[in-house]
Image (cartoon, rainbow, N blue to C red):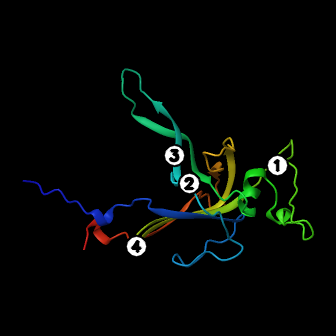
Amino acid sequence: MVQIERSADLTLVGANGGGWVAPVRTAQPTALLDNPAAPWAPLGAINGDGLTVGFEEDSEEFIPWGYTTAFRKITTSSSRTFSATLWETLRPAVLSLMYRVPAADLTPDQATGEVSFAETASPQPDRRAFLWDVYDGPHIHRYYIPEGEVTDRGDVTHATTEMRGFELTFSAYPDAAGNTIYHTLLGVQEGGTSS
């Protein structure tokens, strides 16, 4: 009888995680287990739905004359997105992403403590670098996006029964090497078996 191999320590549950933002093309931190240092700015608390990594692809099939099955298929478009709802909506890095304003413009006035800004009617591209870490005990999966942008924003609800959050979708764009996302994992075991 075939022995089915199952190893719970090779699974990954998104038990915890975090996100950071920096100016576009900021280098990825070299230490996976340390908090990213400036210019990386934390995005703070994320709601319990965590991080969703989206795969959107289209393809074209080529079916030869006389066949009903394709004998070749090419990918015509492929994009990656990251979606999360950020709860620390008073954090400058988060406000900056939601409203497309530089974080430096969100410094409170020293006399009044107020922050004022305006939303433009003609948004310009706002590319930045992003880090997303997913933690499950000793296992980590880091996504580094050297060139990304917020490409979708959800509605904002102000209610006594709900935490205000900014639901954002981030798109990854190719860098100079033609890559959109760099992955770093901790906890992969050689040969795919548990020890």
Q: Residue 61, image x and y in percent?
A: 46, 32
Q: In terms of secondary structure, where does tag 3 sit?
A: strand
Determine the secondary structure under disc 2: loop
Select label 2 or label 3 by which is in front: 2
Q: Furthest-right residue in view? A: 111
Q: Which residue is mark 3?
A: 55
**Most distant residue in the top direction:** 66
Identified by mark 3, the residue type is Phe
Tell me which label, 1 or 2, sits earlier in the chain: 2
Q: Amino acid at mark 2?
A: Asn
Residue at coordinates 44% horizontally, 59% vertically from top-left?
Answer: 14
Q: Which residue is mark 1?
A: 124
Q: Residue at x 86, y 41 (%)?
A: 121
As helix, strand or loop, the secondary structure at mark 1 comes to: loop
Q: Which mark is residue 138?
A: 4
Q: Where 33 sits versus 193, above or below?
A: below
User: In this view of the protein, which residue sits in the foreground, 16 or 182?
Assistant: 16
Can residue 72 be seen here? The reply is yes
Q: Residues within 10 Å of mark 1 (few under 14, many from 20)?
A: few
The image quadrant of residue 13 is bottom left
Q: Nearer the viewer, residue 15 or 57?
A: 15
Residue 98 as seen in the image, left or right of residue 13:
right
Q: Is residue 194 above or below residue 63?
A: below
Label 2 vs label 3: CA separation? 21 Å
Mark pair 1, 2: CA separation: 28 Å
The earlier-in-sequence mark between 4 and 3 is: 3
Q: Residue at x 51, y 46 (%)?
A: 55
Dot 4 falls on a residue whose secondary structure is: loop
Q: Is residue 132 visible?
A: no
Separation of residues labelled 1 and 3 (CA atoms): 25 Å
Q: Which residue is mark 2?
A: 47
